[in-house]
Image (cartoon, grey):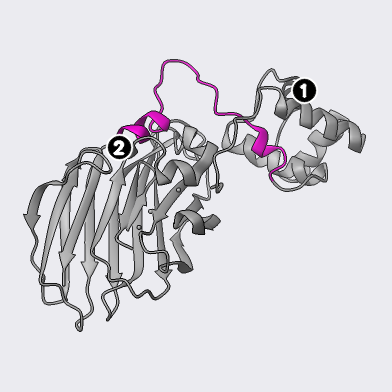
Amino acid sequence: MRDVVDAGSARACHRAPGPDAVVALPGADAFPTALREALNRRGLSLERVSERLRARGIGISQATLSSWQRGRSQPERARSLRAVEVLEEILELPGGALRSLLGPRRPRGRIAPVGGEGAGLQVLGKDSVVEKALGERFRHFNRETGSLVVHDVVTLGESGTLSGISTTNVLRAGRAGADRALFVHSFDDDQAEPVDIRVTCGRLGEATYLKGLNSLVLEIRFGRELAKLDTTVVSYEVEVSPSRVRATHYERWARTNLHQYLQQVFFHPGALPSGCRSYFRDQVGSPARAHRPVPLNESHSTHVLASRCKAGVHGMAWEF
């Protein structure tokens, strides 16, 4: 299995990013046009809409709303994106009708994004399962945050199949306003589907399983907007349905450097491996290197700890 984290990805031999297919990027005037038409249809003035937003605890001025409907600016910050969601309710539109028309965030200044399409392609390659699972969102995949520390716990059942994954991710904001992050889990075995998801730190905003890609996309919200360089912790667990295929490896696909990565694998006492090893790949699909045997301990588990990890594929494999 593999995981694609905020700044990376992960996969397990059973395999960790949205829409089932890549869609065309909406035109630059799609959002303002739809907003103007919805306002006209409902017969609401910008003043009235601003008042309704304020009543919901969201302060958006008439001037900002006017700028949005004229296409002079677009909602980008977390508060503005939340306003778009409430606008859809006020204007009696289906959920996502406006937000789905927003293009990628417009660049400002000389600050390079934390992650995004370029960083993803270097490690994942073109047309990866992650890109297919995220669709258009891959273009700005977690640009506002980057992972510092990641801890994966992989649990196998008595038949040697994957039974669950637990992940803790320490994130840092590269710019102000970040309030959520996307995570992707991709399973090699199409029988190993997620049956329960528990978020223990953060709040689950989206959980979409794309059966055709054997991939799970999670959106986890932080509960607040981060200031630039603020950190937050996200933790969640994914329980996986029983499978007939034994798991043989787990990989984390890291799109950017990590300060630290810890991977633990727990085996069932009735299905212990004959050997385990850690390895590294520069890119998904490239030859594995830096092989190192890792021992099994009395708790029937093994682990690999890497500090100052560079972008790439960090994996562990085992044999029964």
Residue at image point 29% right, 70% down: 155
Residue 317 against residue 10 in the figure, above or below = below
Would residue 316 appear left or right of 136 to someone viewing this image?
left
The picture places residue 266, in percent across and down from the top left corner, at: 23, 71
Residue topped by disc 1: 66
Is 314 left, or right, of 219 in this rendering? Answer: left
Range shown magenta: 96-123
Residue 110 is covered by the magenta coloring: yes
Q: Earlier in the sequence, mark 2 or mark 1?
A: 1
Q: Where residue 313 sits: x, y (%)?
A: 24, 45
Q: Quadrant of the C terminus?
A: bottom left
Please tell me which residue lies in front, 33 or 224.
Answer: 33
Residue beneath the point at 30% across and 73% down: 161
The N terminus sits in image quarter: bottom left
**Left or right: where does residue 48 sit relative to residue 255?**
right
In-front residue for pair 285/309: 285
Query: Going 38% across and 28% down the picture, which residue do you hit?
Result: 118
Amino acid type, callout 2: Val
Gap in Å between the C-alphas at discs 2 and 1?
41 Å
